Image (cartoon, rainbow, N blue to C red):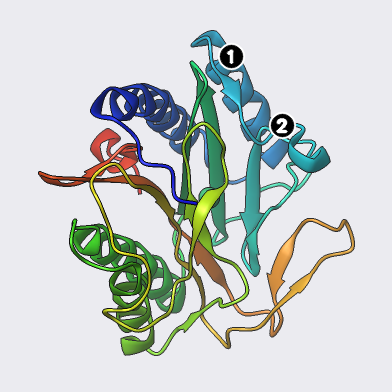
Amino acid sequence: MIILKSPEDLDRMAAAGAIHSRTMKLLAGKIREGVTTEELDQAAEKYIRSQGAVPSFKGYRGFPGSICASPNSMVVHGIPGPYELGRGDIISIDIGVTYDGWVADGAVTFPVGPITPIAQKLLDTTKASLFDAVEACQAGNRLGDVSNAVQRRVEGEGLSVVRSLVGHGIGRDMHEDPQVPNYGEPGRGPLLEPGMVLAVEPMVNAGRHMVRMGDDGWAIYSQDGSLAAHFEFTIAVTAEGPRILTPWHEEGVG
Ligand code: MG
């Protein structure tokens, strides 16, 4: 069941999203060679709590971190820890913020210093696919139009959409209906209506699409060891068009 949100609900979600975006900006300023993902996690948690909000991921199904930090071939769900960022790494940071009972979810993959041309292409394409998806979040479209927008961009650049992981509806719960695959056929699936809120999150491998789980039971890696990127917005469908509720790009991030 897809839960529609009122305009007032969307403003509350945007308040959570504003904290989210400022947290992303804070971490963007800390990402450099030698920083551990644990240090990023602690900075994020401290800031989120200072705003009267809660890091949504902490304790979710036992997840120990406040953020997910996933370097290089890790696609998503990295547990923050002693890993030190290295020159030329890419690092995907996923943050969930719960404020006043509403959840905002978003992710950015950052370069650590200069990166290879293929890594840059991966980041540019994954981010572009997310903005293509935003454009497709129009009332009257169907969910398949959003999914297809991501797939078309990514595969058009010779990269691979991870198929076994999906975006999701979001609201008072972090994961609501519907599931939002990053591949699909245009014109298919649920009708997009004003008040629908989607966490759209392209996960893209530079190599093939398959993934594997790491030994900790959380981390997901590209199966072939290729680099992976992850960009995510929480997006509301409104009568006036798509509204990005986690506007990290407006903070100069990503
Ligand atoms: Mg998400």
Mark 1 or 2 closer to N-term?
1
The image quarter in which residue 25 lies: top left
Residue 81 seen in the figure:
no
Name the residue tied to disc 1: 49
From this view, report whether residue 154 is shown above or below residue 18.
Answer: below
- Three-letter amino acid code at the position of disc 1: Arg
Q: Which residue is pictured at 64% across the width and 55% down the height?
A: 70
From this view, report whether residue 188 is shown above or below residue 26.
Answer: below
Q: Is mark 1 within 8 Å of ligand 1?
A: no
Q: Is residue 197 left or right of residue 142?
A: right
Q: Where residue 13 sits in the image (x, y, percent)?
A: 38, 28
Q: Where residue 83 sits in the image (x, y, percent)?
A: 75, 48
The image quarter in which residue 36 lies: top right
Q: Is residue 150 left or right of residue 38?
A: left
Q: Where residue 110 sits in the image (x, y, percent)?
A: 46, 52
Count residues near mark 2 (Cα–Cα under 10 Å), then give few for <14, some for 14-19, many for 20+: some
Name the residue tied to disc 2: 58
